[in-house]
Structure formats: structure tokens, C-alpha cells
Image: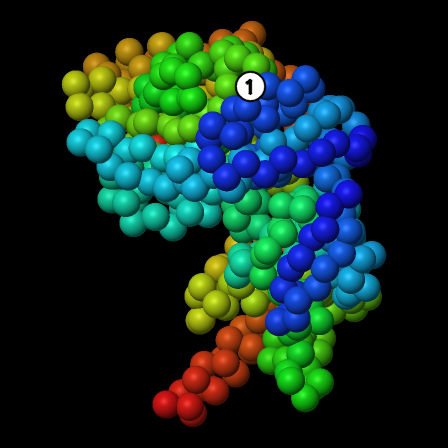
Amino acid sequence: MYAFDLARPADLASAVTSLQTEGAQALSGGQTLIPVLKQRLSQPSVLVDLSGIDSMKGIRRAGEFLIIGGGTTHGTVAGSAEVASAIPAIASLASKIGDPQVRNRGTIGGSVANNDPAACYPSAVIALGATVETNKREIAAEDFFQGLYTTSLEEGEIVTAVKFPIPVAATYQKFEQPASRFSLTSVFLAKMGDGSVRVGVTGAGADGVFRHAGLEAALSADFSAAAVDGVAVDAGMMSNDLHATPEYRAHLVKVMTKRAIAALS
Amino acid sequence: MAKVTMTVNGKEHSGEAEGRTLLVDFIRGELGLTGTHVGCDTSQCGACVVHVNGESVKSCSVFAQACDGATVATIEGMQNDDGTLGVLQAAFQEHHGLQCGFCTPGMVMSASELLKVNASPTEEEIREGLKGNICRCTGYHNIVKAVQSAAATMAGAAQAAE
């Protein structure tokens, strides 16, 4: 790692001030950023550790929404009774991230801000139409994710919470790459209060997380595995690497969607 | 550099750490507690697992300064007060849950957290709980047996105490 100073602000205002320093970068759980720093792929002058900001931690239900603080760890979400009762699919998703030690450090804010194309959380954020709350504004999921490792966050902007609308039912079906434990192709499927079905896919898209309009239309009309068979999933929009071809990922999108339907039936 | 103070295995320790100093390097280099190992240094293998404020973490992916004021437990704190092997360590020895032993400190620390949360885990839960720890020798079977045995011993001790 290159040398840097570590700032440990105790509140959001101090963190925002620290992040105005030239070359400053925010650090949440560090389970992605610290390995990146070790590879010298990033050279911050100041690393602003957000983990001491208590106002960014915690989970609460507000009417038809579940609000998870940006600094809340995956382990906390996975074990939360509040999450289990409001949106159990989110607790299940969090319990499948990485391993127990990664879940004890990694946070939802860090995950969505990093927008790794194979991360778990973005699929839930986009499928449920969640709102990403920052120190400056509220950003709709569709506007937040902008492609691989890219979001609409501005310099120094901090994800303070993610606000999820509570669906009628939802499930997260993960097909993991066994060595990295990231998603090879995973589907977050939600039945919303207005009768619509929403499908978020992570791990597969060449441009990162996406919703699949064809699957959503077919399943909103007919919530069955047979409806999935009639939908074309374009391999041309899938990523290609040594772990899986675009065709395989496109196939997995349908398989994982069918598993999601089975889980909710 | 900054002064970092933490309570490690019940004793307060202080030392100097740069912003980039990892917790594992502080524990090994500054405090001389070399039982915690560095395996992959990429938060995959789990040889460096310690507990920070009661939760298991990969100490190669946590900064020392971020642990200022924290309570840390390492493998050196797992033995009994009289210096004999703790229940988990003894179970690893008894069931041959190690060969080269490099991964063992991390395995014991992860298993220790698992048993704190879930006193009688199923085999599947043990394998899930040790997902972040890689062993290239044993094939894991004897590690799972060791954890099962330690869980049974601890349950027996708890029952006897009642």
C-alpha cells in the first residue's frame, strides 16, 4: 500500500469535511477497498473511515419502508429480526455475502457505492426500486447504478442509508462463483403491492446490475416457470470471463428466475 | 504514525502504527503475537482471523488505527489460564484437525465465534461457519469433527455446571 493518513470521524459532518481534502477517499468495511489498496490500484492521501459514525448504523421500519443505515454490516442485516419480518429476502441475501468475517466488516453502503458487477446488494436495490440516501440527496435506484463500478455519487458524497419499499414477497437466488463467493449470476425477484413483478439480475450483465423487462412483463401477466420459457434473454448483454460465457450467464438468468418462482410458490 | 492502544487477550497494549498498518502486522510486529498468521493477504484464506470487540474479522483487512480502543482476542488467548490447551485447541489435537497447522489459528478463532453464536451447530452450519477459512491439508473432515467434539465438550461442561 502507498502511505496515507487514516481519519476516524465520529459524525457525518466531520466525515464530509475530511472528504473535502484533496485525494481523500471514504472507507467503509474495507473488504474490497483494502485489497485494492494493497494492489496499489488506488492512492488516497487520506482514507476517511466511516465505521465510527453511529448515525449511519442501524435498521428501522418506517411505514411501508425498511431503512438500513449505510454503515450497517451484512452480519447485522443477516441477523436482524426487523429485516427478517419486513423483507426476509434481504436478510437471506446478506447471509450469503462472502463469509462470516467479511460479513462482520462489510457494509451495505460500501457495497452499493462500489457497485461491483457481481455484488449481491445492487440486485435487491434495483429490483425493489429502493432509494439510496446520501448526505446530500435521495437517489432512485435506476439513477444510482451507472455501469461497472460506477454510480451517480459525486466526489465526497456518502451513502447514509438505503430505503427499501416492502414488497408482498421477494426472494434472492444466488448462483455463486465458488472461489470468490461473488455472484456468477443471481436473481432478486419481487412481487410488489401493485401486482407487478420485478426482476433484478447481478453478476451477469456486461454493464453491471440490471432489471429484465421481458421477464418482468411475462411474470406480471403469468407468474409461472412456463412464462419464463417464453422470454428471450439476450446473451449479447452478458459479461464474458474465464468463469462463464455470455450464453451460460443468459441461461442462468432464466434458471435462477425459475428457482425464484419456485421459492415463492 | 499514531499511538494505538488495544486490549489484547485481556491485557492492554500500546504501539505505533501508520495509517496503512494492518491489524495483523500490528499484532505480529508491534505486539510480537505471531500465532496469528498471514496466509493470502487478500482476505480469502482466514489464517489471520482474530476477534475485534467480540466479532471475528480477517486482520489482514482491517487497519490497526481503526482498532484503537478495541478489545481484541487472538489465538494466544485461547489456551486455559493454566497454559493447557483450550477446549477447541484440544479438540483439534484429538481429532487431528490439522496437518501443517498454518491455517489452524484462524480455524480456531472462526470456530470459537461460531460456537458462541450457535452452541450446537449441525455439520452444515460448521462448514458454513468455516467458509472463510481455507485448509490445504486436511480436506476439512477432521476440522469439522473437532468442532463438533468441542461443541459437545462445552455442552457437557455447561450441563455439569448447572
Q: Nearer the viewer, residue B76 or A178?
A: B76
Work out whether residue A173 can be spotted.
Answer: no
Give residue B68's position: percent from left, percent from top. 63, 52
- Residue at 61% x, 75% y: name it: B88
Q: Is residue B53 left or right of residue A180?
A: left
Give the vertical position of B93 relative to B13 (above or below): below
Give residue B90's position: percent from left, percent from top. 66, 81
Image quadrant holding the C terminus of chain A, namely: top left
Q: What residue sits right under mark 1 in the picture?
A: A156
Give the vertical position of A227 relative to A265 (above or below): above
Q: Nearer the viewer, residue B100 or B161?
A: B161
- Residue at 41% x, 17% y: name it: A136
Work out whether residue A243 can be spotted.
Answer: yes
- Residue at 28% x, 11% y: name it: A217
Q: Amino acid at mark 1?
A: Gly
Give residue B31's position: percent from left, percent from top. 78, 62
Circle 1: element type: loop
Corner quadrant of residue B41 = top right
Q: Nearer the viewer, residue A203 or A260?
A: A203
- Residue at 66% x, 67% y: name it: B12
Q: Is residue A199 left or right of residue A52?
A: left
Give the vertical position of B28 relative to B21 (above or below): below
